[in-house]
Image: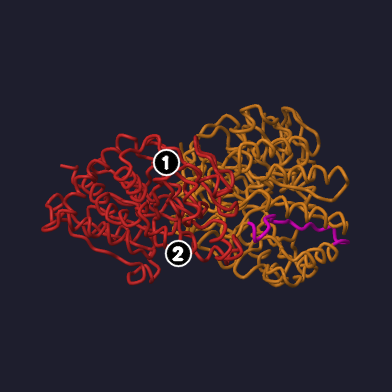
Amino acid sequence: MFGKSVTAIKNFSAEEIRTVLDAAYKFKQIIRRGGNKKLSNLRGKAIVNLFYEPSTRTRTSFELAGKYLGADVVSINSGTSSIVKGESLRDTLRTIEAMGVDAIVMRHKAEGAADFATQVVKPVIINAGDGAHAHPSQALLDLFTIEQRKGRLAGLKVAIVGDILHSRVARSDVYAMTRMGMEVRFAGFKTLLPRFFEFDGVKVYESLDEAISGVDVINVLRIQLERQQAGLFPSTREYARVFGINDERLRLAADDVLILHPGPQNKGLEISSAVTYCEQSAIHDQVQNGVAVRMALLDLTLGGGA
Amino acid sequence: MNQTWQFQNKFQSLLIRGGRVLDPANDFDDKADVLIVDGKIAAVAPDIDSPAQIVYDAAGKLVVPGLIDMHVHLREPGQEAKEDFLSGAKAAAAGGFTTVATMPNTSPAVDNAALVRAMVKRAEDVGLVNIKIIGAVTKGQQGQELAEMRDMMTAGAVAFSDDGHFDDNARIFLNALDYLHDTGKVIICHEEETELVKGGVMNEGKRSALLGLKGRPTVAEDIAVARDVLLAEYTGGRVHIAHISSARAVDIVREAKRRGVKVTAEVTPQHLTMTEDLVNPADASTKINPPLRTQADCEAMLAGLLDGTIDAIVTDHSPHAPEEKDREYIYAPSGFPGLETSVGVLLTELYHTGKIDLQTLISKMTAEPARLFGLEAGTLSVGAPADVTIIDPELTWTVDAKNFYTRGSHSPFVGRKLKGRAVATIVRDNLMTLNQ
C-alpha cells in the first residue's frame, strides 16, 4: 500500500482491508497503554489536512494519528485560507504540494474531489469524505469496531438505516462490509433511498422493522436537518417515531445487536439517548478506533508499515 | 496527422470533381461533379467539362450540402473567454458546418432587436460560415415576460429559445406560442422540469446511485416534453424539442406527431452514442444538460432518428474556458464543444457500424434543419448558395483538444480514434480545407 492514495474503499481488496485492520489493532494497544504515545514511524514526513467542510472527529483523529506517528501535521480550514479568495482546488493542491508535503488528507463537498486531487498532485491523497461518494477511513473504523466487539466479520448481518441517499458512509460501508463477507441491508424512507440502487447481495428496505429484524449490527446514519426543509420528510417528530432507533425497536434485532453511528448524532431524532449510551452501543469506541485505523492507514501508505 | 485548416481561399469558380454527391433535398445520390460560380451552385452533373479557377479532386469523398447545426453556443456577447464568433466559426468550418445558429443564453441574453442586429452584423464581419441568431423567448430568459420577438424577427432572428432552462411558467409559454402563431417561427425548448433537476449533475440512474452524485431524472424531461407537446397541440403553435435524450420523451414526440401536433425534435451525437457509464466524478468533461443517459435511451434516440420522430442532429456545441471545466464535477459548468467532433463521431459510431445510412444521416444535418427553420440552405440545387461540405468517410484521426479551434477543451470525445471527417468546407466563394 506504500505510496498509494486512498480515495475509496471500493478500490481495496479483502486482503488490503485485513492488512489495515491488523495494523490498527497494534496502534490501538499503543493508544490505550497511555504514557508516551509518540512513535517515530513517520518522522520527517509532513501531512496537510485540507478540510473544505466542518468536521470534529475526522479532522482531529487524522491530526492526532499523524502526530502519534511522529509526522508534522498542519490543518487547513477552508474558511481561513485562500480558498475564500476564490483559489481553485487545483491551485490550492499545487500550492500545498510545492511546500513539500508527503500526504494530503482531504474533506470536500464535491464527489470525486479526492480522485481529482490524485490527478493533479503527487503526494498521497487520503480521502476524508467527498460529498455523498466515499469515506474510506470511516468504513475501515466501522469494520474494526465490529470485529473488536463481535470477534468476527464474515457472516454478520448489518442494517444501515436512515439517509442512505446522501450518505458517503453507506456508500463506503457497503463495499467494505460485503467484501469482508457481511450481509448488508439498507433501510430508509423511500425519499432517502437512492433510486435505481443495485448492489450484489444488498437488500433495500422501506420498513425499518423488517430491515433490523435479526441483525447483528445497526449502523444509524445522521439525519441532516436540511433534509426536512427539502421536503424529504415532514417533521423530525414523525421521523423519530417511524424511523428512529429506540429501545423498543432494538428488541427486533439480535439480542446482542451492536449499535454504530458515524456522528455527530441528533439525539431523539435518528437515535434515542438510551440507545446511544446502552451496553450494546459502540459509538464511543468508534471514536478511539478512528484514531487507530487512521494511524494504520497513514503508516501503511506513508511509512510502508515498517 | 496535421489537423490545421486553411480558412481563406477565395475563388470565382470551383469544380469539385469525381465525388459521391449526396443531396437529400433533391433525392440525389450519385457520382458527379459540382460546379460553383460566383458563390452559387452552377451545375451538378457527371463529367462537367468547364474551365474553373480551382479544381478540387473529390475522388473517394462525399460531397454534400453544407452541414447545418441549429444548436450552438458561440457565447457572444459577454462570454468571450468561452468562445467568440471567430473561434466558433473556425470550429464550425473545421467540423464541416457552413451554417450554425447560436443560442441567446449569453451575458446579457439576446432578447431584443438591437442585440440581434449587433450579432447579425458581427456574424457578417466574422464571415467564414453563416451564423444565424436565435432570440430569447422571454426578457432576460427569465420566463416572466415575453421578449420583443417580432422586433427580433425583423432584425434577423431565425428562431426563439430560452435554451439553458425550462420555461416553468406555462401561461407565459402558452402566450409565446400564441404570439408567434401566424409567424411560422419555432420555439426551441430546453426540456427539464426545473425542480426535478435542481442540483443534479448527471443522469439519475444506477451510476448516480453508486457515485452519490445528484441525479437529473429522465422523468423531468418527459414531463416537460409532454407539457410542451400538449401546449403546441392546444395552441396550434410550433415547438421544437432541443437535445432530446430520454426514451420516453421520444415516445411522446412520436405519438404527438402521429396526431398531427406541430412538434419536431433534435438530438446530439453524445446522446446518440454515450451513456452515464462514462461519468467519472474526477473529470467534468461528461457534464452536460440534459445528461448522458443509458444504453436503452441511446437506442431510442437512434430509432427515433430512423423513423422520423427526430428530425435533426445538432451538436449543442457548448464550450467553456478550460479553467471553468477543470474543477470539481459539481461546480463545473455543463456543456462541452461538439462542432469539430460531430461528423467523425456520427460516421464512426453510426455509419461505419451499419446503424444508419448516409442519406438519412446527411439529411438530418442538411435538408431537414433547413426545412424546420426555413433556411435558404441545405441543398445543392442549381442557383442555391454554394454551401458545400466535402467529407472523407475513411480518414482516421484521433481527437486531441490541442487541435481544436474552439476555445473549449474538455470534451468526452477527446482521445477517441475516429473514422471520417470533413476535409473541405465551402461557403459561397471561399474554399476552406484541412491541411493534409
Q: Dot 2: within a 10 Å radius of its alpha carbon, few (fewer than 14), some, or many (20 or more) residues?
A: some
Chain A takes which shade in the image? red
Which residue is pictured at 15% across the width and 53% down the height? Answer: A33
Which residue is pictured at 64% across the width and 61% down the height? Answer: B195
Residue B48, label in figure: none
Q: Is residue A48 above or below residue A9?
A: below
Query: What range is drawn magenta here?
Result: B181-196
Between B250 and B404, which is closer to the camera in this rendering?
Answer: B250
Between B355 and A46, which is closer to the camera in this rendering?
Answer: A46
Chain letter of disc 1 in the image: A
Query: Which type of secondary structure does the marked residue at label 1 adopt?
Result: helix
Asked if residue B187 is among those painted magenta in the image, a careful observer would answer yes
Which residue is pictured at 22% across the width and 52% down the height? Answer: A102
Residue A175, label in figure: 1
Q: Position of residue B251 (x, y in %)?
A: 76, 42
Mark 2: amino acid: Asn
Query: Which type of secondary structure does the marked residue at label 2 adopt?
Result: loop
Residue A266, label in figure: 2
Residue A114: tell me if it is visible: yes
Mark 1: amino acid: Tyr
Q: Is residue B179 above or below residue B220?
A: below
